[in-house]
Image: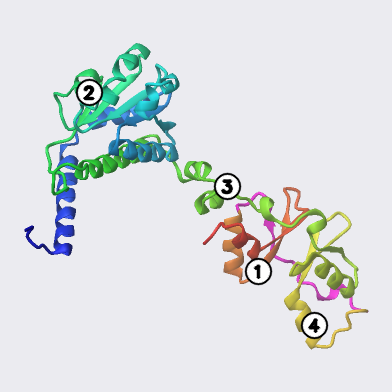
Amino acid sequence: MEQQFNIVNEAKNIFDKEIDALLKVRDSLGEDFETLVKLIVECQGKVVLTGMGKPGHIGTKIAATLASLGTPSFFMHPGEALHGDLGMVEKKDVVIIMSYSGESDEVTRLMPTLHEIGCATVAITGKPKSTLARECNYHVFFPEFEEACYMHLAPTSSTTALLVLGDALALVASRVKNYTKEDFGLHHPAGALGKKLLVRVSNIMHSGNENAIVPEGSSLKQAIVEMSAKGLSMVIIVDGENRLKGIVTDGDLRRMLERGIDVYNETVDNVMTKPPKWIDEREMAVNALQRMTDMRITGMPVLNSEEKVVGTILMQDIYKAGIVK
């Protein structure tokens, strides 16, 4: 009968084995790793990852991480490669082939065609004398370590080590390339960071017929009607050349009504805030949010390079755009 064991202790033992594998791989990094980083940085084509089974799953993630950090990359399933996908590989590419044993038939069968194409080939394997190691131009070898699987069969420590090695490759390569936050935002336009770096005031402001605007000399009643019709919390007052003269906010209106101001006979010129705070349409939306937060206001007129009114931006518009969470 199988000896009883403590479930939590068994889980911790698995962690220990995988951590030990990571430490051994970390300490083994040297010139081969540096060479691979240089190959990735200097690659004029694409970095292609391939591997069968669990390494293949990890390869998909590594390719995605490389691509997200500025290195054109994709995963090529070795089985599909043998049935036409090798047509995606060009001479200027770098092909990274992952197999801990270095003997997986699906990947070793790729080598003759890859040699014919003339691309750079890199083996990541735990067996320096394997077929894969012999056939590739470059190598990164894993040191010996124990798989966390109690049967020593399921890829566990080896796939964890491969995952972290892939992260190291992608991150170090991106740093060598001087990949910036702005670059990251360009490649992640749907994410919050991408929106912070890409969305400008002009992209989300209320402009044209959606903007609440009245000429100077208008009655306060006209300003109220305009603000209500556009559904905004402020109305902008302009001169004959569309230059900013002042604003009236819904908060201003509440305070005026409490004081009994005659909205039918009062003009906006006498009650508007002047000169109001404004922002250039070319500014990043996140900067507009910061300015409004600092000034404790919820909206601002937007001006163009000629300092003419082109819109209104509200704090709630920036939140709705998903720029901040």
In the picture provided, is 58 more to the left or to the right than 219?
left
Which secondary structure, mark 1? Answer: loop
The disc, 4 or 1, on the residue closer to the chain's N-terminal end is 4
Look at mark 2 in the image and give the residue it sits on. 132
Residue 254 placement: quadrant: bottom right
The stretch in magenta equals: 265-284
Q: Quadrant of the N terminus?
A: bottom left
Question: Which numbered marker is on residue 198?
Answer: 3
The disc, 3 or 1, on the residue closer to the chain's N-terminal end is 3
Q: Residues within 10 Å of mark 1 (few under 14, many from 20)?
A: some
- Residue 322 in percent (x, y) is at 57, 57
The main secondary structure of the magenta stretch is loop
The disc, 3 or 2, on the residue closer to the chain's N-terminal end is 2
| Mark closer to the observer (1, 2) | 2
Residues under labels 3 and 2: Cα distance? 44 Å
Which secondary structure, mark 3? Answer: helix
Q: Amino acid at mark 2?
A: Leu
